[in-house]
Amino acid sequence: MEPVVVLSLLGALIFLLLILGAPMKPLRWMGQGAIRLLIGALLLFFLNTFGGLFDYSLPINVFTAAISGFLGIPGIVALIFVDMLIIP
């Protein structure tokens, strides 16, 4: 899709939500989930940055970002163990 179309659809959706109102709990959950995904991606980015010194990296995708974002440091440790021990 064209960026103009995507931005127009997002603008229309925001306008409709402002006019009609939105249930707050589901939006709050979605917002918190999105923030946790971003935090997980940042944690993986820093792991890959510092892991480059030791020639180690983990892929950054939705699955690994979700695990590291929702579980935190124990999730990153679990991802490292899975990567090192189970996936040779």
Image (tube, helix red, strand yellow):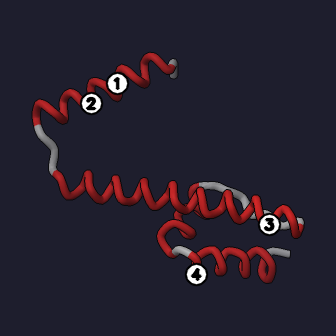
CA gap, disc 4 and disc 3: 17 Å
Give percent across and percent down for residue 36: 45, 61
Give percent across and percent down for residue 30: 33, 54
Locate the C terminus by quadrant: bottom right
Along the horizontal axis of the image, is 70 left or right of 25?
right
Which residue lies at the image location 26% right of the left edge and 51% below the top edge?
A: 27
Under mark 1, the amino acid is Leu
Which residue lies at the image location 58% right of the left edge and 81% below the top edge?
A: 74
Disc sitting over residue 51 in the figure: 3
Q: Which residue is mark 1?
A: 9
Quadrant of the rendered image containing residue 51: bottom right
Q: Which residue is mark 2?
A: 13
Under mark 4, the amino acid is Pro
In the image, 79 versus 55, the foreground residue is 55
Along the horizontal axis of the image, is 22 left or right of 57?
left
Under mark 2, the amino acid is Leu
Tag 1 near tag 3, CB within 8 Å:
no
Q: Secondary structure at mark 2?
A: helix
Q: Which residue is mark 4?
A: 74
CA gap, disc 1 and disc 2: 6 Å
First in residue order: circle 4 vs circle 3? 3
CA gap, disc 3 and disc 2: 41 Å
Q: Secondary structure at mark 1?
A: helix
Q: Is residue 69 above or below residue 77?
A: above
In the image, which is nearer the foreground, mark 4 or mark 1?
A: 4
Classify mark 4: residues with Cα within 10 Å, few (<14), some (14-19) or many (20+): few
First in residue order: circle 3 vs circle 2? 2
Which residue lies at the image location 72% right of the left edge and 76% below the top edge?
A: 80
Tag 1 near tag 2, CB within 8 Å:
yes
CA gap, disc 4 and disc 1: 38 Å
Give percent across and percent down for residue 33: 40, 59
